[in-house]
Amino acid sequence: MLTYNTRLTETKGEKNLPFLRELLVWHKEAFNAASLIQFHEPICSIVKLHSKVYHPFRQANSHIPSQVVIRGEQECLSAYRSIKANKHKLTAPAVKKRLSMRLDKRLYSRRSPFSIGITTSKGRKQFNFVVYPRLKELIERHEMCDPLIYEDDAGFINIAFTFETKPEKLKQKLALGVDLGIRVAAACSDGRIIVDRKFNAEKRRLRHLKSSLKSRGSKSANRRLKTLRRKEANKNRNQTHLIANEILKTDADCIALENLIGKKAARKIAKPNQNQNSISQVPLAELRRVITYKAENQGKTVSLVNPAYTSQTDSISGKREGKRQGRRFYSLGGLVYDADLNAARNIGIRSNLPVSYGNILDGQALVSVPNAGRNTRNVCKSLP
């Protein structure tokens, strides 16, 4: 999904923007009316909310189009669901302050590629919008979803077009095995180990501050603690995207990941007293989700494979022989592999595609540092 914002303009000889702004004010009033009822009587169904809001509101405001009221109810219910999902506590009804509304097919129409008809307080009116080269390319190449109109800080009415991009899927010819881990974020079968020591150091610092604040227990310490928790969550989310971007820097058109479910997922994600507070730990389910949609945007696919014994199998012989000790895997042939890279190759092999191979010998792994704001370097370093 791609979104492009541009400014709405009036057609020649007409001044219809004030009528459109008035419609946005009506939509805000419908939202706030629905929010008042939703706050005092929590409702999970749009049908029940509609039955309580629509007729009383329309009787008091018969000049407001019915579809605008319905859009206000839908947006209100969606807002309260988001509030509940984010575990926010409300002491008063949620209030819509900014002017904005998501249009649907009953509120807009398009007769030409570069103009749009929108329902206003004076009926359906035609509007133009500023067409930039990139926007023109998106309109000509992709299917457009329902747009959003809103008022910006300067008082102008803008429109946000959303396009559904469907890149052509590449034929699966080469797979990249990826082992998502605890001590290192990810190991790839092409020999890359993705880790960011600067991120780990910053995370240690935040956790030390959090530990110090917890022991104080004062109100100011608790306020500061909430800020640090939010900051750490934001850093983790950002790091997830950086790791996903680094993994996808490959010529492979299939990304093979472990299908971590059941006991192995519980053991790998949250071992009591061991992995729960691991510095380099990233949310594996969220990382897999980000990798999946980013891969689809590039025309690549994600294959989930059976994770059983990937860390205990020799990727060269294909047999469960040898021994893993910490970060090293000792094969029966006398070679010493990096254990994570060995597991990544086993994961790639289970995709039943040719695998993107790299050096897996311990002490010669290629380390990738995902970090926004500075050039990423790949350097050879000895692993601890």
Image: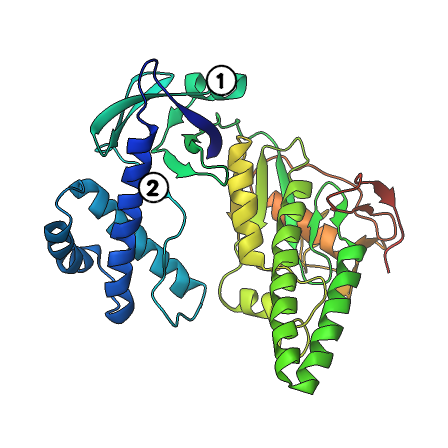
The answer to whether residue 346 of the structure is visible from this angle is no
Q: Measured from the top left, where is residue 201 in percent x and y? A: 79, 62
Q: The residue under label 2 is which amino acid type?
A: Met
Identify the residue under disc 2.
101
In primary-sequence order, the first of circles 1 and 2 is 2
Q: At 66% across and 57% down in the image, what residue appears?
A: 235
Secondary structure of the residue carrying tag 1 is: helix
Query: Is 5 placed above or below 269 here?
Result: above
Query: Is 148 placed above or below 86 here?
Result: above
| CA separation in Å, label 1 and label 2 | 25 Å
- Assign the C terminus to one quadrant of the image: bottom right
Q: Measured from the top left, where is residue 90 in percent x and y? A: 39, 70
- Which of discs 1 and 2 lies nearer the camera? The answer is 2
Query: Is 266 placed above or below 95 here?
Result: below
Query: Is 381 placed above or below 168 here?
Result: below
Q: The residue under label 1 is which amino acid type?
A: Glu
Say which quarter of the image contains residue 125: top left
Q: At 47% across and 39% down in the image, what residue appears?
A: 152
Please tell me which residue lies in front, 318 or 381.
381
377 horizontally vs 29: left or right: right
